[in-house]
Amino acid sequence: MRRVFAIIYFAVVVAMAATAASFSVDAPRRVEAGDVFRVAFSLQNAEGSDFTPPEVSGAKLLYGPATSHSTSVQIVNGNMSQSSSVTYTMTYRAEGGVDKVTVGGASVVVGGKRLTTKPLTITVSATSGSGAGGRQSQRQPVDIDDINTQSADRAVSANDLFVRVELSKQRVYEQQAVVGTVKLYTKYEISQFITKKEPSFDGFLIEEIEQQPSLNKIETVNGQRYYVATLKRCILYPQRSGTLTISSGDYEVTAVQFVAYRTRYFTTQQPVEKTLNVKSNRASVTILPLPTPRPASFTGAVGKFTISSDITPKQLKTYSAASLTTTITGTGNIKYIKAPEPDLPDQFDVYEPSTEAKTRVTGNDISGTSTTTVTFIPQHIGEYDLQQGEFTYFDPDAGKYVSLPIAARHLSVAAGKGTPSQHEAGQGGTIDIAGAQRADAADLRLMAEIDASHTGRWLAWYAVPLAVALALLWYYRRQVRLLGDVSGMRRRKAGKVAARRLKAARALAGNKERRADFYGEVLNALWGFLGDKLSLPTSALSRDTIDDVLAQRGVEQSTREALTALLDECQMAQYSPLTATAGDDDLLDRAATVINSIHNA
């Protein structure tokens, strides 16, 4: 074996010694003004030093030299040959207004001897128009399917990439729904998108529709095609008349362009990134005031609705709780309307009403039901008439108010078991209880003679149930108050809601086909938690606002920086073509840690 290796080594040395070193140049023979091209200087079968670039006229050096090495060994019919090469690559851009590029000789030192390439000339062909400006003006417009039109030497114009705020209507009444959409239009691929400032929807109540932004649609605008991503979509309810303007948003967008590298035999395209600051347009809508005079029963409902009411249980008894439920169904600003207040008899104890809305987005508005429940406890037996009045809403399509009468009810209250409320007992009124007997004088004398040792027992029998009843009443009133405090409830449940959203994101972790959905769920968890916990409207959610509010609340800077990094990472990943999933669990853990830190602070 030693003999065999010695023979092979000897043959390789002999083959290398027999191969003469050479130094040559390779470049395209023809380029266009403004084109980027490469000139490669190759040193064969030798190791060189002290490379000296050539003198070049008619072109601008972009970068270089870039050095690469290669070696190959061949054995053919028992004969071994080996070759090696070192390539020095220079990258230039052809200047406008010249007809040729002159490349002088480059040199390199090999074994103490300097080798030099021959000079060469590259023809620069004329382009349409005169000069670079004429070439730019006569160029083919950027096309989403042609990367040759997406070259890096042209500016990204406002016609090639822009963010636009669009409104579904230009004239509406107060409280009538308008759909606001923020879209990104681009002819280029996008590698990163960061929202620096959201558009401001001042003067509107906002119902945001969850979106998973991705460049998966193509739209034609003014005869030109664009990739389109819906960044934000919400239903707006104007709160005042006049002209309301949605301010512009501010975004940092990184677009992908291409550089063409020309050699003698072929041309290659390599991507380069260009970061731009993009502002959206401002959009305005005219808000018409609601007609006057307004009916007395109108409480702000705008849309189309129906109304119904019900009482449970059907058989009312004294001292037993009952509920009057009013249900409004329809389409419009249903989450913000108020049901008519019933005129319940004075002989009833009435508690604060609670309202629950169940809604869904249908087309360009919101539909659903709003249920208002009033709990009451009759204190006297008897027959009562309940007047519920009418419910009035404004129909924007018809341009008029519509009143819906609510039928009066006749209530019969029978005797029930229990005791009157403290309020009723304090009035000193009589209470009718079927079967009750008036105590006679003998009974009174007997009660007076009860031994003092039994007094404590009798007090306990009445005091304990009374204490329990008072505790239940306090708890009920507290629940009613908490249910009425929507903002407080959102703050209290912010952590639980964020946990559910992170759980939904974890179900998508590792799914390469749904990367945008995964990062969208993480963003929903973070933004939703911040909005609920800090009681901020959706329009106020931005990185700067959140950072300022958290700083005022005493949240540590490290936590704020971790939050900002997470938001940037997720927003960027939604538009990035990367599909790696190894870090999904780590991303979710960091999101949970940030949410817990803010919650604890």
Image (cartoon, rainbow, N blue to C red):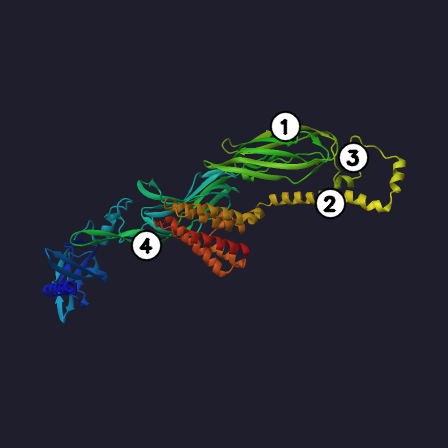
Q: Residues within 10 Å of mark 2 (few under 14, many from 20)?
A: few
Q: Where's residue 349, x and y in %? A: 71, 38
Could you tell me if residue 298 is visible in this image?
A: yes
How far apart are labels 4 and 3 at the CA level? 84 Å
Q: Nearer the viewer, mark 2 or mark 3?
A: 2
Residue ID for mark 3: 431
Q: Which residue is drawn at 18% across and 56% down?
A: 97
Mark 4 or mark 1, which has the lower sequence index? 4
Which of the pair 425/254 is nearer the observer? 425
Mark 1 or mark 2, which has the lower sequence index? 1
Question: Are the residues tagged 4 and 1 within 8 Å (C-beta)?
Answer: no
Amino acid carrying mark 3 in the image? Ile
Residue ID for mark 1: 407
Question: Are the residues tagged 4 and 3 within 8 Å (C-beta)?
Answer: no
Q: Which circle marks residue 467 in the picture? A: 2
Mark 4 or mark 3, which has the lower sequence index? 4
Element carrying mark 4: strand
Residue ID for mark 4: 274
